[in-house]
Amino acid sequence: MQRVRVSVRLRFAALLALVVLAAGGALLAVAYALMAGHLHRTLAEPLASHTLGTLREEFALALAGAVIIAGGLGWAAAHRLLRPLREVTDAARRVTGSGDPRAALVAAAGPRDELRELADTFDAMLERLGDAFAAQRRFVAQASHELRRPLTVIRTELDVTLADPDAGAGDLRAMARVVEQAVDRCEDLVSGLLTLARGEGVAAGDEPADLARAARLAVEETRAEARSARLSVRCDLQAAGVRGDRRLLDRLAANLVENAVRHNVHGGGVVVRTRTRGDRALLTVENDGPVIAPERVPAMVEPFVRLGGGGPGSGLGLSIVRTVVRAHGGELALTPRAAGGLVAEVALPVRTAGPPPAARAAGSGAPATRA
């Protein structure tokens, strides 16, 4: 059996009528009792009984009229009071049929009461949803463009080589090398996208980790690349214990060090530091490189943004760093150097419990070294 739907407006009117019925009935009952006592003392019994009967009828009519009037007033008042709720409901329906949530803003007027606060909160949520949808559309468009580039290269190389009937082994090898580079680029991009989605889609873990260990691994992985560019890499790694997802934290340190090495000048330098300050574990990576305008810094953490508009990598490095830092409740600060290059500092909450022996051994302070 289907349940009958009772609106809030009807419940409000019925509640107000019941309140008037209860309060008015109690008041009239007290008045009747007082009047009955007075009449029985001052009048003869037949006249007192007749007067009380008339009084009961008048009280009943008055109470019924008050209840009806209260119900009508409650019905009208509920219509006015619930108007912001209807506007929020209509806005929610418009959101489902529109691609832009900001087109359904309520923009409620009136006094700043609880209903106005609800409407304003709903508008703020729609604003955030609109920004998130717009960012998602940009991200999908950029990711599609980035993936299309290496695929276009692969398709072009294959078509040109296969269309040449005189292509020899040397041509095939050259084509294979170009295709291999394009496949590597696709793999890097897909790996970066997966890491970015993993950092945004799940909460950070709760396993012990050490930023010093992650930074040391990152320096080791980029040692050959730094050597080929004749970069000096100095490390000052002190224990900096945190809690979280160790793989994501390793990726964070690797991205910072890789960016510092790749976006550098020939013969430049990289400085990697880890330490604790108060209740924060810090990882700082500083490098030489081109001069960066301060107004460009906020855009550097957006996906697919590269220094100079090109260069190696997928353009997801700092975006992944920002996502991982947020997932671990930390902060990322990027400061351009006046002489060129960038200082990137990550601050994460310090691990409350003491690190295990293996972590202490891996994170022990090391003197400054050069790669």
Image (cartoon, helix red, strand yellow):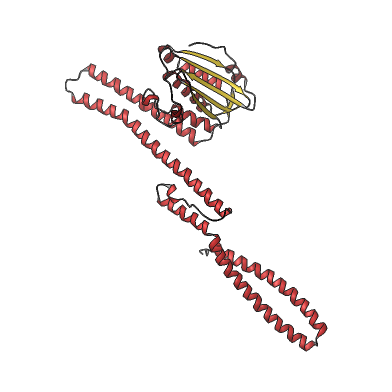
Examine the rendered structure and indicate whether residue 21 appears above or below residue 303: below
> In the image, is residue 17 above or below residue 147?
below
140 over 268 or under it: above or below: below
Instruction: Count the labels in the image.
Output: 0
Q: Residue at x 55, y 53 (%)?
A: 116
Query: Which image quarter: residue 61?
Result: bottom right
Residue ID at (26%, 29%): 155
The quarter of the displayed image where residue 292 is located: top left
Out of 359 and 114, give the one closest to the viewer. 114
Q: Position of residue 325 (x, y in %)?
A: 52, 30
Residue sitting at 74 percent across and 86 percent down? 50
Q: Residue furthest right?
A: 41
Q: Where residue 342 appears, x then y in whole percent?
A: 47, 22
Estimate the x, y position of residue 340 in percent, counting from the top left: 45, 19
Q: Residue at x 25, y 25 (%)?
A: 157
Left or right: residue 347 versus residue 288 is right
